[in-house]
Amino acid sequence: MSALADATETRPGRLRALLVTAALLGHVELRDEIAVLTAAGHELVRHIGFFTWGVAGYGQAMAQLTALAAVDSTGSVGALRDEAAVAAGSGEVGRALMLPVEADVLAGLEYSSVADIGCGDGSRLIRLCRGEVPRRGLGLEISEPASVLAAKRVADAGLTDHIEISRQNVFATEDRPVFPGIELVSSFLMLHDLSPRSRMAPR
């Protein structure tokens, strides 16, 4: 357990308390100084994206729910969220839950360019463009922190010459977006952004 505390830069006492709680919930089994994931724990790890999304992305908002409840309708949970963490969590959820759907939809499709609306941290767009012959990609994202994270991940993947990340709100104008030269348009986990109330200017 001390090795885990060192690796995660965690205080040993707090880590032990966390692991004891996880054991009580059935997610780990404690064997002397070793913590082993149970079957339920492995399933929990598979859905870690929701943890990243909810705790890292909305942790500050959740900590201030009492204050938010006291303000009028102009008070915004969105203003308190960590949008980069929300994007990263969304990417993790996409890998865990959406890959089978993504594979089924794309099976047999021939395309050399793709635009991803609401590209988040860029992980899906990277998957869609990566290959022996990289495809051309365009990622559209309203959030500045998410756009910055996506651009970094594209660079880390060595695809800067093939993928462009553009910060924009596709609902900001009356004209619907068009994608000249783009053969495939994708959008995942964005249904909650399609309501009229959510169509705000880029943040």
Image (cartoon, helix red, strand yellow):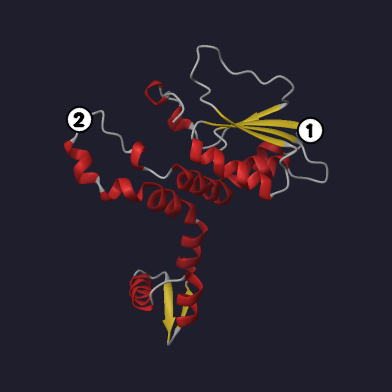
Q: Secondary structure at mark 1?
A: loop
Disc 2: CA contacts within 10 A as few (<14), some (14-19) or many (>=20): few
Residue 115 locus on image (x, y percent) = 65, 30
Residue 1 vs residue 138: left or right?
Answer: left
Residue extending farthest to the top is: 174
Q: Nearer the viewer, residue 76 or 193?
A: 76
**Residue identifier under label 2:** 72
Q: Residues within 10 Å of mark 1 (few under 14, many from 20)?
A: few
| Secondary structure of the residue carrying numbered label 2 | loop
* Left/right of residue 169 with respect to residue 110 in the rendered view: left
What is the quadrant of the C terminus in the image? top left
Q: Residue at x 49, y 69 (%)?
A: 39
Q: Which mark is residue 89?
A: none
Q: Which residue is mark 1?
A: 110
Q: Earlier in the sequence, mark 2 or mark 1?
A: 2
| Numbered-mark total | 2
68 sits to left or right of 145:
left
From mark 2 to mark 1, how far is it between C-alphas?
50 Å
Q: Is residue 98 visible?
A: yes
* Left or right of 185 on screen, residue 39: left
Residue at 43 percent across and 54 percent down: it is 51
